[in-house]
Image (cartoon, rainbow, N blue to C red):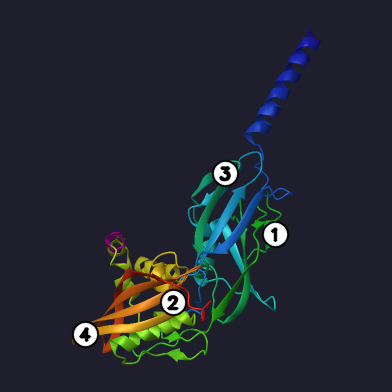
Amino acid sequence: MKNLFRLTMTILFGLLVLTGLQAFELPASPVSEQGEVEFNIRLVDRRIYYVANAARETDPIYVQINITNNSSSPYRFKLADDRAFSIDIDVRSMTNRQLPQTNSLIRKRTETGKIFFREISIETGESFSFIENLRDYIRLEQPGSYRLRVFLYPELMRASSEVSKDIISQIPFGKPIETNYLNISLRPALIPGPDGIPLDMDTATGAVLVKQQLPPDEVVAYMITARQESQWERFFLYLDLQEMLIRNAELKRRFNAENEAGRRQMIENYRQNLKESVIDGTIAQIPVYFEILKTEYNHSEAAVVVLQKYRMSNYIELRHYTYFLERKDNFWIIVHYSVQGMGTEAVPRAIN
């Protein structure tokens, strides 16, 4: 009878142990040795970035953090509502000098308080990503070339920002996952103009780009020539991107609903899309030839008609562009355009 009692207790104890182990089951391994869970980063906007100053302190540098599960089982981790408790960003110069964290980030992490989070589960073959502003984490005060990487803490950051990563790695489940390295270059802060707005810089010469009081036809010719020479800053010098953006009714509604920072970001995205020919590809497409056909203007408005030719695979496409300009602060600025196809012509031998 005693033996039966011992056997029963042994079985019950074993069941309790197994149940306890299941209740406290270790989380999925962050990254397998075969790299079954990929963790990488990329810049959201491929453009010129500048050192922050008073005029551009809100100019963001967005980094997309992406996690892809290539394993055969779900991958789970905790993601804080305030991402500063889930990730850390390390930025170093080419001489391995580590850039300091922002004061706001240090204060946030050293203050006592609850960390609110949710558990993320990534199924096999799926990805999860989120975007953070690099300027929220790192003080970018000097121009130069830098390398950055991101650390993800699957069980959140439980230590002060002053604790070294060696100490953090000794905390259960506290060792972070590291991303790939990303290169980024920062140019000197833009020179503020008389109105406090930073002046555009000529990327070819490094000189300040200053608008000139050109007539409407010369403004259009300047813009097209700059595009032919792939001088983007000169191309944008006489374009009112906000006016061009809100010509679209849907985008105008979105633009009006945004706050100031959101509107600036929409304009910056529109600028980048033009450069990548994602939208309005016709104005960003490079013509092999152009000719000003007609210019009409009064004191405040102008219209310039231009014949532009584009080289296709085995023919030349002809288009009539009408550029609409407005006089703003005594400068003619392009605010809109329309395009009309004019047929094709054979490829001249000189071009062939």
Q: Locate residue 215, reporting x and y percent.
A: 29, 90
Q: Amino acid at mark 3?
A: Ile
Q: Amino acid at mark 4?
A: Tyr
Question: Hey, which quadrant is residue 248 in on the image?
Answer: bottom left
Q: Locate residue 115, reporting x and y percent.
A: 51, 52
Q: Element type at marker 3?
A: strand
Number of the front mark, 1 or 3: 3
Disc 4 versus disc 1: distance between alpha carbons? 70 Å
Disc 2 versus disc 1: distance between alpha carbons? 60 Å
Q: Residue at x 45, y 75 (%)?
A: 286
Q: Amino acid at mark 2?
A: Pro
Callout 4: few (<14), some (14-19), or many (20+) C-alpha neighbours within 10 Å? some
- Dot 2 or dot 3: first in sequence order is 3
Q: Element type at marker 2?
A: loop
Residue under circle 2? 287
Disc 1 versus disc 3: distance between alpha carbons? 28 Å
In this picture, residue 259 sits left or right of residue 119: left
Disc 4 versus disc 3: distance between alpha carbons? 59 Å
